[in-house]
Amino acid sequence: MSGPASVDLLASRQLKTLFGVVDELLYRYTNSDIVVMGIGNWKKAPAPLARIHSACFAAHYLWSAECDCREQLDITCNHMQREGAGILVFLDQDGRGNGHAALMRAAVYAQQHGCNQAEAYAALGYPSDARSFDGAGVVLRDLGVAAVRLMTNNPVKIDAVGRAGIEVVPESVVSPAAETPWLSGYYRLKAQEGHRVARPEEETCR
């Protein structure tokens, strides 16, 4: 049986951001690029806050109100900045790993047929969730991280980091305070998939 795929560090630099100067690292894992943002004193923290965040074009660039991807990212960055250390791992996995075109088609199908997004992907011939988080775990291991407080509601991410030999303490990422009419079904699907979905009144990152 072959071991886990290795990662290659392609480039690194310091980047000025709204959260101060951060470390940006670019990795290549299998055929995908993975971007890491190290905030504050992340290299010396014994168990830094960490988040694995998949790309979401609609949320990050079009301000979509149909998911909470942008809100989760903002909450995570603010929490890491307050704590003074954190690691963000960005994966190019828009549309649950199926791509943005698939996401758009599935969104239309779900609206027309009254089903959820995962069911729409399956009906259109896509995997209901094609994402993999193994690369994030391998990257964290390459960074020399032994333990993280992983900011996620997704048990699959927790398992992926654990398989890389990293001790994981999960920390819930709260949902946005102002829930839109479109988010009820979105959260219902997440709960069905085993996510720890925080409600708007639970606005703490424990």
Image: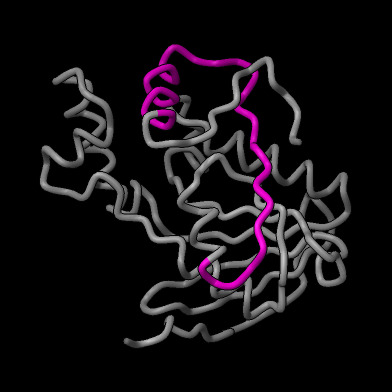
| Residue at 48% over, 37% down | 59
Residue 5 is situated, as x and y percent measured from the top left of the image, at: 42, 82
Work out whether 147 lies above or below 186: below
Which quadrant is home to the N terminus?
bottom left
Q: Residue 122 placed where, x, y %? A: 16, 41
Total label count? 0
**Residue located 70% across and 43% down the image:** 76
- Tell me which corner region of the image, top left, top right, bottom left or bottom right, holds residue 185: top left
Taking 12 as reference, is 78 above or below it? above
Q: For the view shown, which residue lies furthest in the top direction?
A: 181
Magenta stretch contains residue 181? yes
**Is 176 inside the magenta-drawn segment?**
yes
Give, as a single range, the part of the protein colored magenta: 163-191
Q: Position of residue 128 (x, y in %)?
A: 25, 44
> Is 78 left, or right, of 181 in this rendering?
right
The colour scheme used here is: one colour
Position of 44 compared to 133: left or right?
right
Quadrant of the rendering where the C terminus is positioned? top right
Q: Is residue 192 left or right of residue 16?
A: left
Q: Nearer the viewer, residue 10 or 160?
A: 160
| Residue sitting nearer the eye, 165 or 48 | 165
Residue 96 placement (x, y as % from top left): 35, 48
| Front residue of this view, candidates 201 and 95 | 201
Decide: is 188 above or below 71.
Answer: above
Q: Residue at x 68, y 51 (%)?
A: 169
Q: Residue at x 49, y 62 (%)?
A: 160
